[in-house]
Image (cartoon, helix red, strand yellow):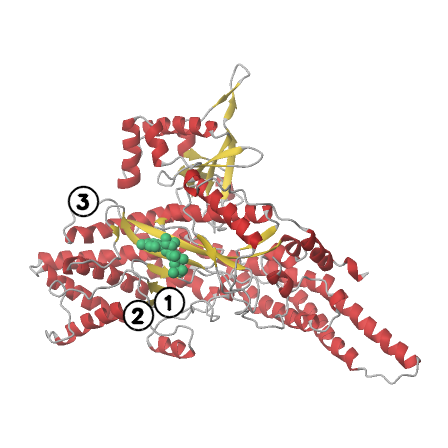
Amino acid sequence: MSGNSVRLQAITSVEAYTPPAASFTDTEAPGEVFGENVFSRSVMQKRLPKSVYKSVMATIEHGVKLDPVVADAVASAMKDWALEKGATHYAHVFYPLTGLTAEKHDSFLEPVADGTALAEFGGKTLVQGEPDASSFPNGGLRNTFEARGYTGWDVTSPAYVLENPNGNTLCIPTVFVSMTGEALDHKTPLLRSQQAMGGHAKRVLTLFGHESPDNIVSFCGPEQEYFLIDRHFFLARPDILNAGRALFGAKPPKGQEFDDHYFGAIPERVLGFMMDTERELFKLGIPAKTRHNEVAPGQFEVAPMFERGNVAADHQQLLMTTFKTLARKHGMEILFHEKPFDGVNGSGKHVNWSLGNSELGSLLVPGDTPHENAQFLVFCAAVIRAVHRHSGLLRASVASATNDHRLGANEAPPAIISIFLGDQLADVFEQIAKGAATSSKGKGVMHIGVDTLPVLPTDPGDRNRTSPFAFTGNRFEFRAPGSMQTVAVPMVTINTIMAEALDHCATTLENAVAEGTEFDTAVQNLLTEIITTHGAVVFNGDGYSDKWQIEAADRGLPNLRTTLDALPELVTESAMDLFEKYKVFNHREMHSRYEVGLEQYALTIGVEARLTCEVGTTSILPAAVRHQTEVATNIGALKAAGVEVDTAGLAEVTEPLTALRAALAALKAALAADPGETALAEAEHAQKELLPAMAAVRAAADTLEGIVADDLWPLPTYQEMLFIL
Ligand code: ADP
Ligand code: MG
């Protein structure tokens, strides 16, 4: 009987499985395939008339509006290129508020009057599409009678051909907006925020003597963590299959952290998978660097090279899709969930952020001259000001039911958003602050424009892994984003709050200069003002410590522990005014993000609660009952034979079994209760009623896992899932 359990079948199947070989050939250099499937600049340069190419480049580099005539020429070249690559369809790819990727596929062939079919793809089709938007979340932005959404080509993110055994598709990255032009996606606000920030960054640069610098954009290098488990186990775990995380599972008997277990070589099978993913990503022009992550067993990391923010965001989504497909090809399932295994480290997605352009590089690199350093310090100070004023918004940008398991759990930065500057830079800012207080020229007091900064290493050794927002030599690393989420949301927030901070810097400097203040003095005053007003957000200590929680409260830094604490930050008057001022979101759009955030939260926990109920009732309870029956039968038989018996074994299983029954009944009742109509009521019900009820079921079930006979236990265990690859 027991030998047929799904779990034991899974174990047998894993043993019998032979993974495919990686498709990288020995003779092929990675560089050979790089960008093979991308309608890249070099492809455009070759295939487009010179004037058209120049016009497209002007749009990409300088934000010049796209000429419709140009669109026709590009469409025609793009179509020819895609057909040569074997594409039969094209798709506008967009990023709805679910955080996933959506595509609407259309055939290149359109029937014409004489009964034949022609490959049809003009400028209009390239530039705009009209997918039915009614099934995407919109948070009240759209009525059903205006269900149409419009996709619009993002010229700055290259089109590519996605291969599939059933036919290739030309994919065009697009924005997705409602009939009224309101954003229904994550790309639209990202482009808007980039534009807002870029404009004010240019004002600052102009003050520092740069004449008409190229567009300033945000750069992003996302580090993606993930788990791999054998697909046989995945299929035997309805919770992981449907919710992406184990809703049950006792911690394995040996060391929760597994520190000693997994430092060694990458399993051969995983290596094969990594090589395949690398090859696919290269073909799509995604500059991946793959490597092993040593924190938890079965956990790995990939970090592509940084790119322009909106391109990095597109590539990040594409990377996740590619990884999912290829993991399956290699008989595994990839888990992007922030906390698939309770008690084992979770996964994040560090957003390495900076701003700049190809001519100037990152503006967060300290320079060699006092003048360059002053400029660098102004951009750094802008970050300090932005993060201090809007740490709540940053926290909200990473808020989700799934990321709540991770933030503040001593493996990820706390929910308190602070900045780590490193000793040297922190020291520089301390001196600047003192400079204002004493206005002396004494030792240790720095005057911008006069003294040279100490040489700052571009890759400082003193990394602080406990800080949510850390300066790392040429960028800031935002470590709080969850592994599953799109990087667009945190980037929209960073860009927007930076737009405000740079606006402040530019305006202050412009006014001071107009009033006759010397520029260097104006810069000095600005830096002093910022660091004295906003220095409280700088913290170089241990973010995991309890002491910091208390100190942060003293400093007045918000500590928004859960998603429901954080989401209201989106709809405060000041937040809505900020986003409206910089033309990133209007008030309605902000409300819609808030609503969708609540909806997604309630949905996620609702699904988990129903799964907990189902698996608890149909898998775990019966297994425990069988075990109880076996023990009872055994006791009865021994007694009948006149053997003296200890009945403790029966009590041992009966107690948690009774607890499990009670917890399941309570969970069912919570699921049946009417939470109320609003998204907020549903979300609050999920947090206050469902989560604790699920935890009680799990506690009883996990106790039973340590009691029930192994051959009766239905679910693959942590040890099996994490260590068999
Ligand atoms: P670590 O694990 O030490 O934080 P990684 O090398 O794994 O570093 O990842 C660093 C990421 O930061 C990479 O994606 C890299 O391309 C990116 N990065 C480097 N410089 C910048 C920059 N100026 N702006 C944005 N991202 C950057
Ligand atoms: Mg990192």
Quarter of the image that includes the N terminus: bottom right
Measure how far apart labels 3 and 2 are at the Cα level: 33 Å
Nearer-the-camera pick, 417 or 48: 48
Measure how far apart labels 1 and 3 are at the Cα level: 35 Å
The amino acid beneath tag 3 is Ser
The amino acid beneath tag 2 is Val
Can residue 258 be seen by looking at this rendering? yes
Q: Quadrant of residue 73 in the image?
A: top left
Question: Which label's residue is closer to the chain start, 3 or 2?
Answer: 3
Q: Secondary structure at mark 3?
A: loop
Q: Quadrant of residue 416 in the image?
A: bottom left
The amino acid beneath tag 1 is Ile
Q: Is residue 670 left or right of residue 258?
A: right
Q: Position of residue 522 (x, y in %)?
A: 13, 62
Identity of the residue drawn at 39% across and 42% down? 181
The residue tagged 2 is 538
Q: Position of residue 554 (x, y in %)?
A: 34, 78
The residue tagged 1 is 417
Question: Which label's residue is closer to the chain start, 1 or 3?
Answer: 3
Residue furthest to the right = 641
Q: Which mark is residue 212?
A: 3
Q: Position of residue 10 (x, y in %)?
A: 70, 56
Q: Position of residue 9 (x, y in %)?
A: 73, 56
Question: Which label's residue is closer to the chain start, 2 or 1?
Answer: 1
